[in-house]
Image (tube, rainbow, N blue to C red):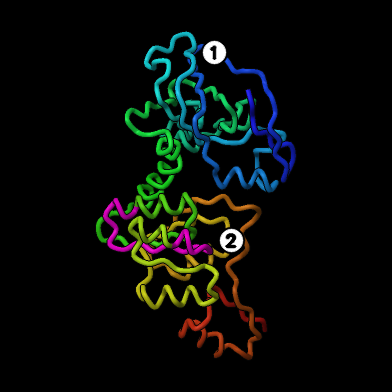
Amino acid sequence: MRVAMLQRAGEVTIEQAPGLTAGPGQVLVQVAYAGLCGSDLHSYEGTHPFRHPPVVLGHEVAGTVAALGAGVTRFSIGEAVTVMPYVHCGACQQCLAGRTNTCLNKVVPGIKGWQGTFAEQFVSQADIVYPLGEISMRRGVLAEPFAVGVHAAQRAGVGPGSTALVLGGGSIGLFTAAAAHLAGAASVAVTDLYAHNLDLALRLGASHAYSAGNAAMVDQVRADYPDGFDTLFLASSAKVTVRQALALAQRGARIVVIALFAGDVPALVTHELPLDEAQHALEMMASRDEPLVKALLRP
């Protein structure tokens, strides 16, 4: 079978690999679509914290059942399916608390010998395979990223009357915005660098869309939302979103981090002034004419 192999950062080659087989309790999936995720891009760029080349990337998938391992009876050959792409241990403190997604021993495609979905075939444990029914393959491959957005909205407690800001309008950010809208949020705003993402955000129900490339974006958002937001989502790996979220959050707001940041997020200090400029520092804090988060005085 053919696989797309990340040989090293910045280089993907198409290779021939042995066909896969379904072991006991497993399902062999003939891949119809494999989605590209931002985490795949991190691996491609060499910044992913644990998925390193050489590796077959990909974890979003839709396809048909090609073979069933011993003991698997709830699927039929040719049935359309998707996969929730992680295996949890069931024994660590996170699993015992019901948080299997944060399992301390979690295994995902692309590590510990589990081949990713950028291939003609993909093997998965049967208990994380889900039938698509009448859902098309093209939509079914979006099940996992959409689930991320739904989970984020649920974790944030979005509901009727909520005001939500999604910083980063890529696929995960857009799904999060859509989930917040469907959960009944009174208003949902999205920021992104790209106009086509912002246009799509509005089509998916966002109330406002802002260009992250605008140096005055925070002031622009604050003009439309003078009271700030009660719920904010960091759906971009740009570290500046942390500062933006803090600047636009209401008191008691909830900030949900979805993105995978490459490296440490810088400290919140945005201004450093000599002691003689104490009044100027306080004036900036009062007026918020500048994107100030934390100011320091230097005696």
- The residue that appears at 31% across and 63% down in the rendered structure is 187
- The residue that appears at 52% across and 67% down in the rendered structure is 212
Number of labels in the image equals 2
Q: Give the spatial CA distance, label 1 vs label 2.
A: 42 Å
Residue 105 appears in view: no
- The residue that appears at 56% across and 47% down in the rendered structure is 38
Looking at this rendering, what residue extends furthest in the top direction? 70
Q: Position of residue 6 (x, y in %)?
A: 69, 37
Q: Position of residue 171 (x, y in %)?
A: 47, 50
Looking at this rendering, what residue extends furthest in the right direction? 8
Residue 281 shown left or right of residue 90 in the figure:
right
Which residue is at the front of the view, 81 or 236?
81
Whether residue 288 is situated above or below residue 168 in the rendered picture:
below
Q: Mark 1 = which residue?
A: 23
Image quadrant containing the N terminus: top right
Q: Position of residue 244 (x, y in %)?
A: 50, 67
Whether residue 163 is situated above or below residue 174 in the rendered picture:
below
Residue 35 shown left or right of residue 267 in the figure:
left
Disc number lying in front (1 or 2): 1
Quadrant of the rendered image containing residue 295:
bottom right
Whether residue 101 is situated above or below residue 129 in the rendered picture:
below
Whether residue 162 is situated above or below residue 100 in the rendered picture:
below
Magenta part of the chain: 180-198
- What is the number of the mark on residue 239? 2
Say which element carries label 1.
loop
Residue 147 appears in view: yes
**Residue 99, magenta (yes or no):** no
